[in-house]
Image (cartoon, helix red, strand yellow):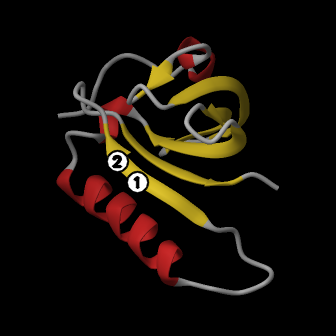
Amino acid sequence: MSDPRPFEPEALLGRLIDGRFELQGVLGAGGMGAVYRARQLSMDRAVGLKVLVHGRAGDVISVERFRREAYLASRFAHPHAITIYDFGQTTDGLLYIAMELL
């Protein structure tokens, strides 16, 4: 069952994800989630943080696709591709991919 609440990317601004990533701005959003400009506190660096919409977190297929995207992108090395730094899930179920910010 999908989440009846509409996804509002701005609602997460200022939130600390996993105690490590502070969301600072929305870079883009779509039906599956949003990409934020974030600060990785432990490294004091700007990163891109892609999150899966909460309503999709209960959808096994969406979650598996998101996990697979993180895994495959982390294995891909090319000068014209971003670097994946991390992948995780918060205690409240928010899935995220931390990546190089271009």
Q: Residues within 10 Å of mark 1 (few under 14, many from 20)?
A: some
x and y percentages locating residue 36 in the rendered image: 65, 35
- Residue with the mark numbered 1: 87
Q: Secondary structure at mark 2?
A: strand
x and y percentages locating residue 61 in the rendered image: 24, 59
- Residue with the mark numbered 2: 88
| Residue type (three-letter) at the residue carrying disc 1 | Phe
Which residue is located at x 61 percent, y 16 percent? 13
Query: For the C terminus, which image quadrant?
Result: bottom right
x and y percentages locating residue 49 in the rendered image: 58, 43
Which residue is located at x 31 percent, y 55 percent? 62
Q: Secondary structure at mark 1?
A: strand
Residue 87, by quadrant, is bottom left
Residue 58, by quadrant, is top left
Residue 11, by quadrant, is top right
Q: Which mark is residue 26?
A: none
75 vs 89: above or below: below
Query: For the N terminus, which image quadrant?
Result: top left
Which residue is located at x 69 percent, y 68 percent? 82
Left or right of 81? Residue 1 is left
x and y percentages locating residue 14 in the rendered image: 60, 13
Q: How many marks?
A: 2
60 vs 31: above or below: below
Residue nearest the observer in this picture, 27 or 80: 80
CA separation in Å, label 1 and label 2? 4 Å
| Residue type (three-letter) at the residue carrying disc 2 | Gly
